[in-house]
């Protein structure tokens, strides 16, 4: 009797084991239930991410459109907004019950991590949607992973990348099935620009190129443009305003050719015109409002590179314009046309959100370090060139408040952008108080100019 009972139990266990094995692939074809995720963001019309944080565990769901029954989809956390240095996880229908933990060293196929810190939950294709669900610890302790930090108090949160394709194994995504964005993992996704738009009496002014003809006989072109902001804002030059946000407006038809642009502010009102160096080989006449003065060449106020979002200033602050402050903007746009294409017309620029109700505090912009990559701190003002190979340099600014209005002896740093042209690989900014105590540290460990030439890092501290 005991033998018969044991045989029956074994048959039952084998049946249960068979049921469990059958249940696993069935689970791979269950669609993502959005109700299981309190947070989500549509990164692209064909790509949506869902997530939640439960204790020390990060739960992720990804859904992407595919054309058939096969496909792959990837998600990455990127310090600089591009592939180099990105921490990546991807799912392939060729491995329907697996998830791959990887990282990228360059703009090439991801490298599989030594340790897989992701746990597969489900995945598959349903109704033209490829999806997967997986979990990982917020901090894996793995040197090939980025730690997911509490980003609820940061400006932009974490930089992310997304890619997908129709082949059953991961491959090249092409130009239309990739995306870069920024996400706050620890709070409800929101656009800070929406709060600015809702302010009573808010106004905006568009400063856009008017179908600028990108030259077809030069790979690189710099276009300088001077704008009288009083005229653009429809105000007299005596009316002071505060700019609350600067929003990039990029022409979709020529976005691939807009390398970057910068915005400088000028206070001059001289009646005569002057000349500006342009494109490394010629001079161009500019309007009097951007005339260079003996006191300087204006102040750098804004910069845009691919991947940058709108610059929204903290509540209660603004960038002062007109009324004795900056009167005009000069936009310097860098265009790339490596294939010397003809007929390219660009209408990119910025939208400036402003109010005549002055805020409690003024925004200032300070440029420190070595902006011309000339090593002037190491040669008594003379220009030097970087040596061949890897090198390291440190630059010091002993008084952060120097250059601000008289009587200002305290500032709060709310954001920084780390920029190294195409030369640098790693950068760190440290701000200390008068006693040498570290108050704020911003860093980029894997700099990527190709994706985002101005890195707005997740920061520790708020200045002083």
Image (cartoon, helix red, strand yellow):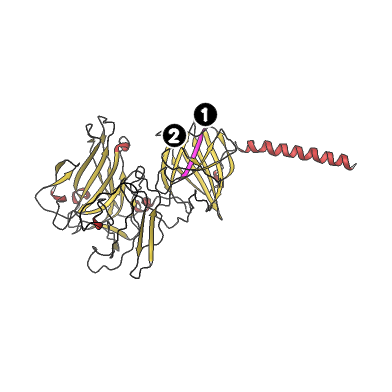
Quarter of the image where the N terminus is located: top right
Using a 10 Å C-alpha cutoff, classify the residue at mark 1 as few (fewer than 14 neighbours), some (14 to 19) or many (20 or more): some
Q: Quadrant of residue 93?
A: top right
Q: Position of residue 3 (x, y in %)?
A: 88, 41
Q: Secondary structure at mark 2?
A: loop
Instruction: Tell me if residue 69 is in the magenta stretch.
Output: yes
Q: Quadrant of residue 459?
A: bottom left
Using a 10 Å C-alpha cutoff, classify the residue at mark 2 as few (fewer than 14 neighbours), some (14 to 19) or many (20 or more): some
Q: Nearer the viewer, mark 2 or mark 1?
A: 2
Earlier sequence position, callout 2 versus callout 1: 1
Query: Where does label 2 land, which residue?
Result: 173
Instruction: State the separation of the CA atoms marked 2 and 1.
Output: 16 Å
Q: Position of residue 360 (x, y in %)?
A: 30, 63
Q: Is residue 240 left or right of residue 182?
A: left
Q: Position of residue 266 (x, y in %)?
A: 19, 53
Q: Is residue 267 left or right of residue 186?
A: left
Which residue of the protein is positioned furthest toward the front in this rendering? 388
Instruction: Tell me if residue 27 is in the magenta stretch.
Output: no
Chain part drawn in magenta: 67-78
Q: Secondary structure at mark 1?
A: loop
Which residue of the protein is positioned furthest toward the right in this rendering? 1
Q: Residue at x 43, y 52 (%)?
A: 157
Query: Where does label 1 land, which residue?
Result: 68
Q: Which mark is residue 138?
A: none
Quarter of the image where the C terminus is located: bottom left
Q: Are marks 2 and 1 in contact (CB under 8 Å)?
A: no
Q: Position of residue 432 (x, y in %)?
A: 35, 65
Q: How many numbered circles are shown? A: 2
Q: Is residue 40 left or right of residue 334?
A: right
Which residue of the protein is positioned furthest toward the left in this rendering? 272
């Amino acid at each position: 009797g005991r033998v018969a009972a044991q045989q029956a139990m074994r048959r039952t266990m084998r049946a249960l084991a068979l049921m469990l094995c059958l249940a696993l692939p069935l689970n791979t074809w269950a669609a993502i239930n959005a109700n299981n995720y309190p947070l989500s963001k549509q990164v692209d019309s064909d790509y949506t991410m869902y997530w939640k944080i439960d204790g020390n565990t990060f739960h992720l769901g990804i859904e992407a459109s595919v054309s058939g029954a096969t496909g792959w989809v990837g998600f990455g956390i990127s310090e600089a907004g591009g592939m180099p240095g990105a921490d990546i996880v991807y799912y392939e229908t060729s491995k329907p019950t697996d998830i791959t933990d990887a990282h990228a060293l360059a703009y090439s196929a991801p490298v599989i991590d030594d340790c897989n810190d992701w746990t597969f939950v489900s995945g598959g294709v349903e109704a033209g949607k490829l999806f997967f669900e997986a979990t990982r610890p917020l901090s894996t302790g793995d040197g090939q992973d980025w730690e997911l930090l509490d980003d609820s108090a940061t400006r932009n949160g974490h930089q992310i990348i997304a890619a997908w394709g129709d082949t059953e194994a991961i491959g090249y995504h092409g130009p239309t099935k990739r995306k870069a964005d920024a996400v706050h993992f620890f709070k409800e996704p929101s656009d800070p620009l929406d709060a600015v738009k809702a302010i009573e009496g808010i106004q905006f002014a568009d400063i856009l190129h008017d179908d600028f003809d990108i030259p077809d006989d030069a790979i690189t072109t710099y276009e300088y443009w001077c704008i009288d902001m009083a005229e653009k804002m429809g105000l007299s030059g005596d009316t002071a305003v505060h700019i609350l946000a600067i929003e990039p407006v990029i022409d979709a038809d020529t976005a691939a050719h807009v390398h970057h642009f910068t915005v400088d502010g000028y206070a001059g009102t001289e009646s005569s015109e002057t000349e500006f160096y342009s494109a490394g080989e010629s001079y161009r006449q500019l309007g009097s409002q951007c005339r260079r003065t003996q006191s300087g060449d204006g102040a750098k106020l804004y910069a845009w590179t691919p991947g940058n979002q709108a610059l929204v200033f903290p509540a209660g602050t603004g960038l002062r314009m007109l009324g004795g402050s900056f009167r005009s903007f000069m936009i310097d746009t860098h265009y790339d046309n490596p294939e010397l294409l003809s007929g390219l017309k660009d209408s990119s620029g910025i939208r400036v959100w402003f109010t005549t109700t002055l805020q409690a505090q003024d925004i200032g912009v300070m440029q420190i370090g070595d902006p011309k990559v000339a090593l002037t701190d190491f040669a008594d003002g003379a220009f030097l060139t970087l040596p061949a190979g890897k090198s390291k340099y440190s630059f010091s600014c002993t008084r952060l408040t120097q250059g601000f209005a008289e009587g200002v002896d305290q500032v709060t740093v709310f954001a920084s952008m780390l920029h190294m042209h195409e030369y640098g690989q790693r950068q760190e900014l440290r701000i200390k108080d008068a006693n040498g105590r570290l108050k704020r540290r911003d860093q980029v460990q894997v700099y990527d100019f190709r994706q985002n030439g101005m890195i707005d890092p997740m920061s520790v501290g708020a200045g002083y």
